[in-house]
Image (cartoon, rainbow, N blue to C red):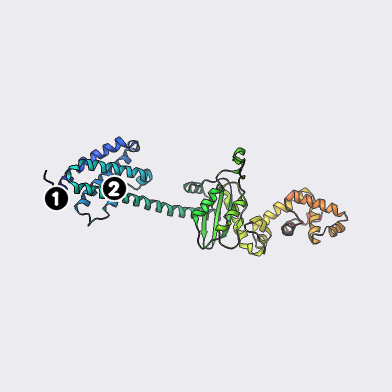
Amino acid sequence: MKERTKAETLAWLRRISGELATVTLGKLEEDLPWYAEMPPGRRSAVGLVAQAGITSFISWYDDPRSTPWIAADVFGAAPRELLRSVSLQQTLQLIRITVEVVEDRVKSGGQGLREAILLYSREIAFAAADVYARAAEARGLWDARLEALVVDSILAGEADDELPSRIAALGWHGHGEVAVLVGTTPSQLDVDQLRRAARHMAADVLIGVQGGRLVLVIGRSTPRDQIPEEETIGTSPAKTFFEIASQLAPMFGAGHLVLGPEVGTLVEASRSARAALAGFAVARSWRNAPRPVAADDLLPERALAGDPIARQTLIEKVYRPLQAHSNELVLTLWCYLDNGRSLEATARELFVHPNTVRYRLKRVSEVIGWDATGAREALILQSALILGSIGEPEQRRKR
């Protein structure tokens, strides 16, 4: 049988292109369940891709050198939404079936035509991978911008109605309590490593970079109170936020690292963020501050810097609970701190035994959770007494 010339082959291919497209669509419906289950509109879009592939092959066969990347144009025949409904694996299945149909129909066209089909199918496969890679890159950039927007909203305290939907779009896996960690940005920030380290501790993070400041919003993948006891037998218990922050600390730059207080939900994270940011701004004033340090351990410095949240926290967590419990405890604490934390001097001023002073200080610690016998905690308590007394009416202070 006389082999066709290239011009004759091209004319023949153009005549049967419609037939090839029809057979291909029938084969897709027969062999690919996912294609048969698609809505009519998407099936039509997939059919356009297959038909465009056949047409593109004919143009490429005519002159492969003039249009070396024409294969990439095949995917322009379908709407962009198709990328979100058809996976790369499904696309490769589509390419395989289309190539099989064309190969079977043109097998009598000669060795040169068969080799051209094999070469073109390789180009199409690479083009598909390129399309999906660019789509993934674009989605990654969009996710990064959306994540930065969410973190900025949390830092600014702008918890609008759209915040939950934005968080959901990011694939946030955190549940329940949240805390915000603020530190310095390292010279080489590895975001993926940060996320892997958080996942290893059953946590999720939102990451925000603001110049030299790195902000993490941390949430647990499973709330601590919902982890079955049998899952923790023989393993370490669920980590606290402070333990999580300690393990993430090496991924921050040099400098202070401040952890905001735990809050109930991600929407409330702005309270933790404000405390962490205020603590980060004044952390350098505590000469031996640990790393990380809790924002509430920096309450005196924050209050001196004018942070209203710190002043209110000191009054509500120290001054008012002590005053509500007993004026005797408030007076004992005042005397103890004014006398340089000396039990004997305090006892002489109050005309009581030193053991009585010791007992009252123990009660102070039980009521508010801070121990006045420690130097750092004594500073916190003295700051609370000063702020509380400033805001107290004169009549009550004289009682």
Q: Position of residue 297 (x, y in %)?
A: 67, 57
Q: List the residue tagged with mark 2.
A: 77
CB atoms of marks 1 and 2 within 8 Å: no
Q: Position of residue 167 (x, y in %)?
A: 50, 48
Q: Position of residue 307 (x, y in %)?
A: 64, 59
Question: Does any portion of residue 45 appear in the rendered image?
Answer: no
* Amino acid at dot 2: Ala
Give the left or right position of residue 237, taking residue 192 as reference: right
Q: Is residue 33 above or below residue 360?
A: above
Compare residues 383 and 140 and report the one nearer the observer: 140
Q: Secondary structure at mark 2?
A: helix
Q: Along the polypeptide, which appears first: circle 1 or circle 2? A: 1
* Amino acid at dot 1: Ala
Give the left or right position of residue 295, taking residue 129 as reference: right
Q: Residue at x 17, y 42 (%)?
A: 108
Q: List the residue tagged with mark 1.
A: 7
Compare residues 129 and 107 and report the one nearer the observer: 107
Residue 333's image quarter? Answer: bottom right
CA distance for labels 1 and 2: 27 Å
In the rendered image, the quadrant that contains the C terminus is bottom right
Question: Does any portion of residue 296 appear in the rendered image?
Answer: yes
Give the left or right position of residue 303, taking residue 3 as reference: right
Q: Is residue 341 above or below residue 108?
A: below
Q: Residue at x 26, y 53 (%)?
A: 70
> What is the total number of numbered labels drawn onto the structure image?
2
Compare residues 113 and 38 and report the one nearer the observer: 113
Q: Position of residue 39 (x, y in %)?
A: 34, 38
Compare residues 305 and 279 and report the one nearer the observer: 279
Q: Residue at x 71, y 54 (%)?
A: 315
